[in-house]
Every structure is written in C-alpha cells, then in structure tokens.
Amino acid sequence: EHQAWILRRFLTQVEGQEAADEEEPHSIVGEFARLKSQSNKFRNEKTYSSKAAEKQENVKKNRYKDIVPFDHSRVKLNFITSRNDSDYINASFIRGVFSSTEYIATQGPLPHTLLDFFRMLWEYNAEVVIMACREFEMGKRKCERYWPQTQEPPFVCEPFTVYCLSEESRGDYLARTLQVTYKNCSRTLKQLHYVTWPDHGVPESIPSILQMLEEMRSYQSYGDASICIHCSAGCGRTGVLCVIDYTWNLLKEQMITPDFNIYDLVQDMRKQRPSLVQTKEQYELVYRTVKLLFERHLQSADI
C-alpha cells in the first residue's frame, strides 16, 4: 500500500508537470532544458575525462565525435584475438538496479569496429543484444550489419562466425536467434531489433517497447552478464530503453522510493555516458512510458 501511495503521488505530480506551461522550470520540457545545460557544463568543464576516446588511434573508432565514453565508465576489452587488438571500444557500462554493469550502452558498429564489437559480446557473456535503429535511416548508414539473414551463408568476422538460426517478426521489432562461434566454442545470442522507431521523433506505440523489454528479460534476467543495447550513437534511443527497464525493475521489486524522479535518474545515467536520452521527445516518451507502467501496476494490484 505504501508503494501504491508513492505511485499515485508520482502520477499526480506528472499530471501537474504536463499541465504546466513549457516555460516553467518544473514542466517536463523545462526539466529537459536543465538536463541539457547540466550536460553542456560537464562537457565544457571536462568534469568527466574521455582520454581513451581522444587518443589518435581511437578517434576513428567513434561514429560521432561528440558521443564518446567517459574513462571512468568505459567498457575495456581484455579479450585479445590478435596483436592489433586494443582495449578501446565506444561503449559504456550503465548501472542497473541489480548490478553496476547491468547495461552496456554502445554505438552501432562501424565496418572497422565489428571485431571489437564481437570481442566485447564474447568477453562480457552477452546473451541479448537490443538494436534500436535500422541499418539505414534518411539515406545514411546508421549501423553496420553484424548478422546474416536467415537464408544467407554465415557472417564471418575472423575469428568469429555468426549464424542466423531463426528470425520472427513481433510487429514493431524482429527477434533473431543467432549462434556465435569462436574457435570450437558456440554461444546463442538473442537479438531484438526494433525496426519502426522513426528517423525523427519517437514511436507511437509504447506497448511494443515494453513487449521487447519483457522479452529481453525472459532471456537474460539478472545474472553476471551485461545486456548490450545500441542504436547508432548509443545514447538517445539506447538511453530511453535503459531508463525504462531500470524503472520497471524498481517497480517489480517494489523499490520505488518517495523521492523517485525521472530527472535524477537520467542525470545519473548521463554521468555514465554523455547525452543518454538525447532529445526532448525522447524524454517525454520516458515520462509517458513510466506513467503507463505505474498505472498498469496500480490496476493489476487493484489498489
């Protein structure tokens, strides 16, 4: 009942924020403006260093020069397949409810970072990868393909080979079962590929996002392995999915505290990777989704 009271209070507060004028600092749009200026301050004052990302040999491994991992939370690659391998990849660990490395937020691989991407999946025992962008959007390549279509020969990225065992459509996303082989070892990897996120803006349908996250958790609940989530830059859509899943886990565990708020949660994640939840529309989508989760929870509990 205490949890229900907290949820109701949050919903009442959100109603007030939605009704407020956009110019008001406590409105959802006003909150996002505060987040943005805080992030700009971090960037200008170099609050969190990104020395590894700025090394000359690593610059070309970043898809976008302004979205690079902070040194304190970057994913380091220790799994070596050849003499040329380095420990750098444009990826960040994001704290979850159950682990400090619950999520790996990363950019969509580039042609020359595919091997690093597979090394990371292998080293950190990823069982699920969520891809929240399409390969091409607005005529631009947003992510290099790292899997074969079902009828195609396997995808080879020496020393890794990837087979597509199945692909099923879930409407707004595809669920693929991939088999990744390294030397004599094979592992199954589930890839959930959200294909209807518009180039600009956000999805209309919140239930399909929740369905995908629910399926993600059915394959990988709360073990030692990190869940890999990527879009093109690994911050906007990736951040939305991290925040929603994080909040949903709090809700399932009845861990929503009276001081819970989305602003603090997003700000905390932005200290782990820049620009997580990148746009005002994405921030509003997080609010709408959390609101729906809380309302559903109250209805199902019938409190």
Image (cartoon, helix red, strand yellow):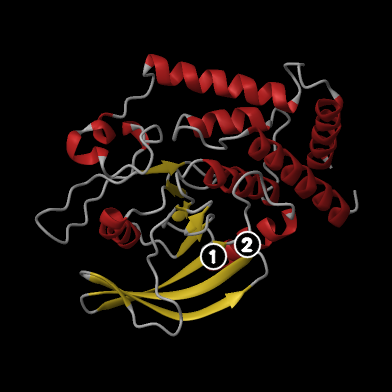
* Left or right: 54 as drawn, with respect to 248: left
Q: Residue at x 58, y 77 (%)?
A: 168
Q: Which residue is mark 2?
A: 212
Q: Is residue 171 above or below residue 229?
A: below
Q: CA separation, marks 2 and 1?
A: 7 Å
* Left or right: 249 as drawn, with respect to 222: right
Say which quarter of the image contains residue 263.
top right
Helix, strand or loop status at disc 1: strand
Q: Position of residue 69 (x, y in %)?
A: 36, 36
Q: Where is the N terminus found, in terms of image quarters?
A: top right
Residue nearest the observer in this picture, 31 or 9? 31
Q: Residue at x 77, y 16 (%)?
A: 24
Q: Residue at x 45, y 55 (%)?
A: 228
Give neighbour class at mark 1: few <14, some 14-19, many 20+ (Cα, 10 Å): many
* Numbered circle sitting on residue 145: none
Residue nearest the observer in this picture, 245 or 240? 240
Say which quarter of the image contains residue 283.
top right
Q: Which residue is mark 1?
A: 192
Q: Is residue 300 above or below residue 98?
A: below
Q: Position of residue 3 (x, y in %)?
A: 78, 41
Q: Residue at x 51, y 73 (%)?
A: 176
In the picture as drawn, the residue positioned furthest to the bottom comes out as 151
Look at label 2 and name its amino acid: Met
Look at label 1 and name its amino acid: Leu
Are the residues tagged 2 and 1 within 8 Å (C-beta)? yes
Identify the mark nearer the N-term, 2 or 1: 1
Q: Position of residue 21 (x, y in %)?
A: 82, 20
In the picture as drawn, the residue positioned furthest to the front comes out as 139
Give neighbour class at mark 2: few <14, some 14-19, many 20+ (Cα, 10 Å): many
Q: Is residue 97 above or below residue 278?
A: below
Residue nearest the observer in this picture, 231 or 219? 231
Say which quarter of the image contains residue 143.
bottom left
